[in-house]
Amino acid sequence: MISSAAFVVSETGHLLLVVSVLAWAGGRILGSQRGALLGFAIGAVLSVLTGEWSPTFYTRALFGDLSALSWVFLAHLLLVSVFGKESLAPPEFRALALPAVIGAFLIYPATLGIPGAPDFYNADFGGFALLSASLVAVALYLKRGFFVAAAGVGFGFFLYGLDLHESANLWDCLIDFPSVIVSGVILVKWTRAHRRLRRMPDGASIEGS
């Protein structure tokens, strides 16, 4: 049975999902910060509804509990949409996206039933080894000054250690399918920008690359 604290965390995560996506959509459709604020307000009002009337009912059915990386990406989307503030610089985005995509290649083949794929999801790599690798990542993030990225991994530990996620596996607390898709998009966009940069004359640059 889910604890009250886990329920609150789950509800908060899906509330963040609804308001951030609607704020982004409002800003894109109306082309202004007022549009983003309107989308945020609509999401907040809808999320007060209960049961099948609430959009969080359906987002939970689709995605389950959100991972820490999804929380980080959604919080960034909300801040950019409503306040115009960047919580993550492009290098920090990539520093989060690359491990997420690597992790997906490690765990999804076996979970999708591909014959012969090693089951890192249920092996010890989902416990001690993954925890150790994540701590190394935190140390590297802190060294680079990527404090939001480090806090995101720490939040994953928080969800895992206090049983605040529906899954008892650290993998799920750190990454999930939506955050992996976003990570893949981030890396593809960076790769394309990097290729364009290499083709440009000497001295030219692409912002954020």
Image (tube, rainbow, N blue to C red):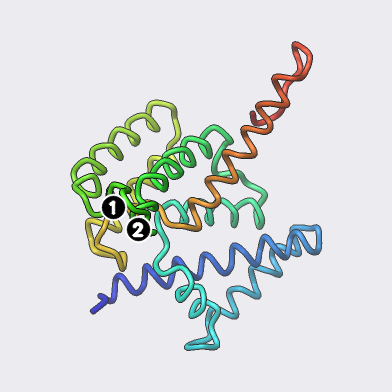
| Residue at position x 57%, y 38% in the image | 187
Q: Name the residue under label 2.
A: 111
Quarter-wise, where is residue 146 in the image? top left
- For badge 1, the amino acid type reads Tyr
| Residue at position x 50%, y 70% in the image | 15
Q: Which of 65 and 32 is in front in this view?
A: 65
Q: In this view, does 51 lie to the left or right of 5?
A: right
Q: Is mark 1 on a helix, strand or loop?
A: loop
Instruction: Give residue 160's position: percent from left, percent from top.
Output: 26, 57
Disc 1 to disc 2, how far (Cα)?
A: 8 Å
Above or below, 35 relative to 52? above
Q: Earlier in the sequence, mark 1 or mark 2?
A: 2
Q: Name the residue under label 1.
A: 121
Q: Nearer the viewer, residue 123 or 135?
A: 123
- For badge 2, the amino acid type reads Thr
| Residue at position x 46%, y 76% in the image | 61
Above or below, 20 relative to 80? below
> What mark, if any, has residue 203 been given in the picture?
none
Instruction: Give residue 130's position: percent from left, percent from top.
Output: 26, 43
Instruction: Give residue 132's position: percent from left, percent from top.
Output: 23, 38
Label 2 neighbourhood size at 10 Å, few (<14), some (14-19), many (20+)? Answer: some
Instruction: Give residue 17's position: percent from left, percent from top.
Output: 53, 65
